[in-house]
Image (spheres, grey):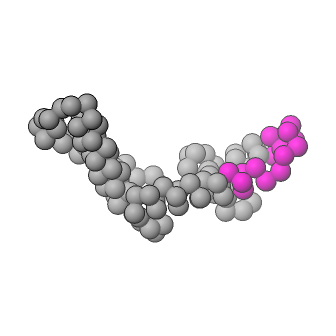
C-alpha cells in the first residue's frame, strides 16, 4: 500500500485498509487500475493550485490557511456588498468569523 492510500484515508477519516479494500472491489467491478493514486495526485494538484491562489506555500499550517480563507471571504463579501449597493459594510459584525479551528488528527 502506497502513501496515496494513507493520505486519502486520513482526509476521508477511514482506515487505509478500508480504502484499499474499496479500491480492490471497485477495480474488480470496473477494470480500472490505480484510481486511488490518480485521485491522490489530482488532489495534490488542486491543493497546490488553491494554496498558490491564496498566496500560501505548501508547508503552511492549518491556522494560516484558515486566516487566508477568512481574509479572502471578507474581501469577497465586502465587494459583494458594494456591488449590491450597500454602503454599510463596515457595520457588519466581523466577529461572525471568529471561531475555533478543530484540528484533524
Q: Position of residue 47 (x, y in %)?
A: 53, 56
Q: Which of the 4 image quadrants contains residue 29? A: top right
Residue placed most toward the observer, 96 or 73: 73
Residue placed most toward the observer, 84 or 2: 84
Write the residue at 27% across / 42% down. 79
Q: Position of residue 64 (x, y in %)?
A: 35, 60
Q: Quadrant of the N terminus?
A: bottom right
Residue placed most toward the observer, 10 or 73: 73
Instruction: Give the total number of marks visible in the rendering.
Output: 0
Relative to 55, 39 lies left or right: right
Is residue 101 something that shows in the picture? yes
Residue placed most toward the observer, 66 or 18: 66
**Vertical placement of residue 60 versus 87, above or below:** below
Q: Is residue 38 magenta?
A: yes
Query: What type of secondary structure mainly makes up the magenta span?
Result: helix
Relative to 20, 30 lies left or right: right
Is residue 100 something that shows in the picture? no
Write the residue at 27% across / 45% down. 74
Q: Position of residue 90 (x, y in %)?
A: 13, 41
Write the residue at 14% across / 35% down. 87
Write the residue at 28% across / 47% down. 75
Looking at the rendering, the stretch of residues picked out in magenta corresponds to: 24-39
Relative to 14, 29 lies left or right: right
Relative to 80, 54 lies left or right: right
Amino acid at each position: 500500500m502506497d502513501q496515496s492510500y494513507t493520505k486519502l484515508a486520513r482526509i476521508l477519516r477511514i482506515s487505509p485498509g478500508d480504502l484499499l479494500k474499496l479500491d480492490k472491489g471497485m477495480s474488480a467491478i470496473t477494470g480500472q487500475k490505480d484510481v486511488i493514486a490518480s485521485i491522490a495526485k489530482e488532489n495534490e494538484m488542486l491543493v497546490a493550485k488553491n494554496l498558490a491562489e491564496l498566496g500560501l506555500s505548501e508547508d503552511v499550517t492549518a491556522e494560516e490557511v484558515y486566516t487566508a480563507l477568512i481574509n479572502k471571504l471578507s474581501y469577497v463579501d465586502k465587494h459583494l456588498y458594494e456591488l449590491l449597493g450597500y454602503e454599510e459594510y463596515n457595520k457588519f459584525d466581523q466577529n461572525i468569523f471568529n471561531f475555533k479551528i478543530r484540528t484533524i488528527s
